[in-house]
Image: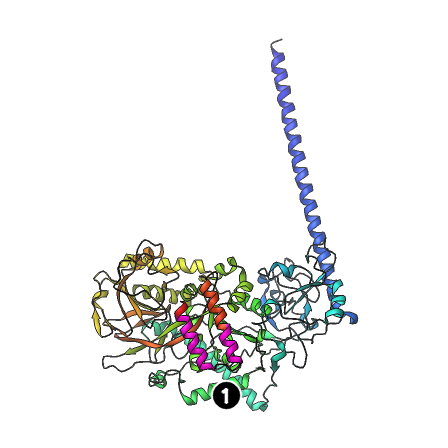
Amino acid sequence: MDDLPDLFAGKNLAEMAESRFFVLSCFVAGLVGILTIAFTAFQWRRNINLTWMKAIARSKKNPKAKNKAPETSHTWILESVTRAKNLNCCVCLKSLPPSQTLGPMVASDSFFNRCHICGAASHLGCSSNAHKDCKCVSMIGYENVVHQWAIRWVDITDQTDETSFCNYCEEPCSSSFLSGSPIWCCLWCQKLVHVDCHTSMSSETGDVCDLGPLRRLILSPLIVKELSPTTGGILSSITQGANEIASTVRGRIRSQSKKHRLSNGPSADTTSANTTSDTSTDATVGTSLTIDGSHNTEEKDNGSISIGEQCSNGDLNKHLDSKPGISRSSSINQKDDSQIVRRQKYAILDLPAEARPLLVFVNKKSGAQRGDSLLLRLNMLLNPVQVFELGPNQGPEVGLYMFRKVPHFKILVCGGDGTVGWVLNAVDKQNFVSPPPVAILPAGTGNDLARVLSWGGGLGSIERQGGLFTVLQDIEHAAVTILDRWKIAILNKQGKQLESSKYMNNYLGVGCDAKVALDIHNLREENPEKFYSQFMNKVLYAKEGAKIIMDRTFADFPWQVRVEVDGVEIEVPEDAEGVLVANIGSYMGGVDLWHNEDEDFVIFDPQSMHDKVLEVVSVSGTWHLGTLQVGLSRAQRLAQGQTIKIQLLAPLPVQIDGEPWLQQPCTLHISHHGQAFMLKRAAEEPLGHAAAILTDVLENAESNHVINASQKRALLQEMALRLS
């Protein structure tokens, strides 16, 4: 009898274990069933979407639904299949990433073609059969711009909510399989339409496109004329090809010897973004292969050409200081101009009075190196003719020449502070009566000038504020302001200029901060793959700064420099490890120099970027810079002045707007060079909106011949100073 409780207890444990196993089995079976249903639904949706894409492709071949826009071939560039995620071939509609195989991947499976204008992608073998439905940049002869309907191969996530509805029936447009009709997208205005609605809409409106919300910034294809290629015979083609090859070889030689030159100080032909040679150290781009539908090599759109060697010998520039705005040499300038004219692919005819077209320069290698996606998105939102890629063989001169007769155009620079300086130098040389204002899309690492002009500190902030589409709308309504530009002459003991002058927009640093910038520059040259994001760039800056803190590299700095401001020598503090000459209030990626400045300390006037006065600041090492960054310290202002001389008694690192080099003993003479028109984001500032409205009024007055260009420039300057 005593064994009965034990028997019942064992039986209960067995039943509990069996019930738990049953519950677990049911849970696993249910989970597998749910996953199976989800996978089946996903495959079903994918197959339906693929069927829709085929239906759209068939509708392109239907004569009754033939598009009225001119046929235009795609402009293909080769890309690795690693960038083909979620992409389908626009011809066969199959997935671009090759299926996994046990054998090695063949070369044809390693790359695919992508149109850098509309974003369409195709297999290498399919591209020759692609429909000619790319964006037509020139519609000369048409009375109105017509819609160019195509499949939206690339999602533009920063579009307004209105663009997600059909332009005809106003019903939602969705890629879901629950929707009723496949969708077309206009390559110009970005509006959507159901394929079923297109015939009715076309018969009512004639497919006339108004270019959408960005119509004032877009260069209308009605006024873009494609130029006939210059025919110079076989000899001219051979000479042109030889010049391009020679230019490429010279660029590679300069790249290999750049680090050696930096370690020995700048020679007579040292170049940077701040020199008259207009070559930016953050503006080197690789050459991308552009091919047509038959895989034949061709030139890029929008006059993407090789200008040849942009660097000039310092001896040719040494006498130009007394002639600001004059080109380096008449013979060199004539040669460059003839090259630019010969290679122009498009010309701009008379613009409508209300047009304010945007000229865009993109430096693909700035900062996080996201120029490829920027180029594609800008080509999709604007006319590709107005978007130019900057590189070692093409500077801003090509775009500026094409826009030389365009009134009231604006400039957008997509890059870092060095790229902005490069473009401003080129604008100076054009001798505009009223220079175009410049906006900045911050794509560099520091982006200090973009910060003070309220454009943000990086591409991440742009995405958070509404994306590229919102930025373009803000540029249209931005306020014009003034930026002082400064000339730096490098002199020897006898006062003779050693090399061509450099130009500063933001700041000049000598000592510890320049050493960090120089070490980062050398690291970027050796290992460019490490600089894949703005955050990682700043981490590397912090790492190099920590090394300098530990080494006490600049303990003797106060005795290695002499500073003179407006003829008066300024004492450098004994704890100083660097001297900064600042034109703007942001420094090294967002350091607010005057954040904790005592308001009762009224010896100095408030800092301004258009008062023709510079601030001289002492830096007590990289630790001081770090505490400034987090708001735990303040800048030690030494003086204010219009003419500054810094005498280097020993070799010291120097940086101008983030472009560093090692400078041998000399005297840096800083003087006012001129002023540039910049665009400041109005945001929610009432004065900013007022300035934007007044700018538009002045431009309309000039168009109606009420005032001339010189009067408009003077009024803009006065307005910018009073509203700042």
- Locate the N terminus by quadrant: top right
Q: Is residue 556 left or right of residue 141?
A: left
Instruction: Give whichever of 721, 385 is nearer the camera.
Output: 721
Q: Residues within 10 Å of mark 1 (few under 14, many from 20)?
A: few
Quadrant assignment, res 250: bottom left
Amino acid of disc 1 = Ser
Chain part drawn in magenta: 696-721
Residue at horizontal 23%, vertical 65%? 557
Q: Compared with residue 240, is residue 666 higher up or lower down, i.e. above or below?
A: above
Quadrant assignment, res 646: bottom left
User: Quick one: SS at disc 1?
Assistant: helix
Instruction: Give whichever of 211, 339 is nearer the camera.
Output: 211
- Whether residue 432 is visible to the viewer of this picture, yes or no, is no
Residue at horizontal 30%, vertical 63%? 512
Q: Compared with residue 491, is residue 585 higher up or lower down, i.e. above or below?
A: above
- Whether residue 376 is visible to the viewer of this picture, yes or no, is yes
Colour logic:
rainbow
Q: Position of residue 572 (x, y in %)?
A: 22, 65
Residue 684 is one of the magenta-drawn residues: no
Give the residue number, with chain letter if any, for mark 1: 338
